[in-house]
Image (tube, rainbow, N blue to C red):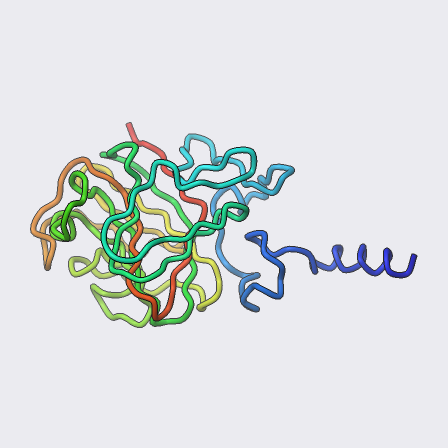
Amino acid sequence: MKRFTAVLLGLALGCGPGADGAPLEDQPATEEGGAVSPAMAEGEMAQEGVPQIPEGYEQLLKSYDGRYTKAGWNHYGPGYFELDSSTGVLTAHGGMGLLWYSVEEFSDFVLELDFRCTNAETNSGVFVRVPGVPTSDDYIYHSFEIQIYDAGEGIHLTGAAYDAEAPTHLASNPPGEWNHFKITFVGSRLEVELNGEKVMDWEAEGRGKVEDFVPRGYVGLQNHDDQSPVYFRNVYLRKVE
């Protein structure tokens, strides 16, 4: 009975699984304050622990019967992404490559997702409006990468349109905590919110390495290198009519 009471007390004090389903001993000690997706922020959790899809959004990293799958996603280039099918967390390995959602091209949309960095040197990005099926690295010159790199500066800092437009400030949580991106791309207007703070509101144009961009394309996640992995989860998209 004493053992049973101790277990119940431990659960009440938050000693059970972490936010993404892993035991707390496997979680970074700072994760508790991390940002989460809209569904999780409002406590909308299904009984089996899978977050409900926010109203009006499509779940791009889909789950079936509580198990996540990369169905509909393809990978181009070196490296790969490993998916934990029970937690829905993607872990990047190697690079540089691109995991892109191949089911549909999007024009005007709001893309939301969570990401977590190993340290300040973690380098990755979220690509929007990738023009056609990637068959070479040429896509980086014709789409925008929303940068993830806390050690960068200006147009290479987290929240930037990489090499094109700098964020107003760095709004990242400390390494080990979850961050939340909200990326809105309507027409040529590109807005980025990081952890609820607007860090970019820009009338996009070809600039820096980006020669031009298309009105419609794929979205993707970058695996950059093996030095400091990045993690993603809760990838949702809402079309803007």
On screen, residue 105 versus residue 90, left or right, reads left
Q: Which is more toward the observer, 20 or 36?
A: 20
151 versus 214 height, above or below:
below
Measured as percent of width and height from the top left, residue 95 is found at: 27, 60
Measured as percent of width and height from the top left, residue 15 is found at: 70, 60
Q: What residue occupies the far left of the structure in this picture?
A: 211
Q: Residue at x 48, y 63 (%)?
A: 177
155 versus 193 height, above or below:
below
Image quadrant where residue 165 sits:
bottom left
Which of the image's four quarters has the N terminus? bottom right
Image quadrant where residue 45 sits:
top right
90 versus 130 height, above or below:
below
Which of the image's four quarters has the C terminus? top left
Q: Residue at x 34, y 65 (%)?
A: 170
Q: What residue occupies the far top of the structure in this picture?
A: 241
Q: Residue at x 23, y 65 (%)?
A: 156
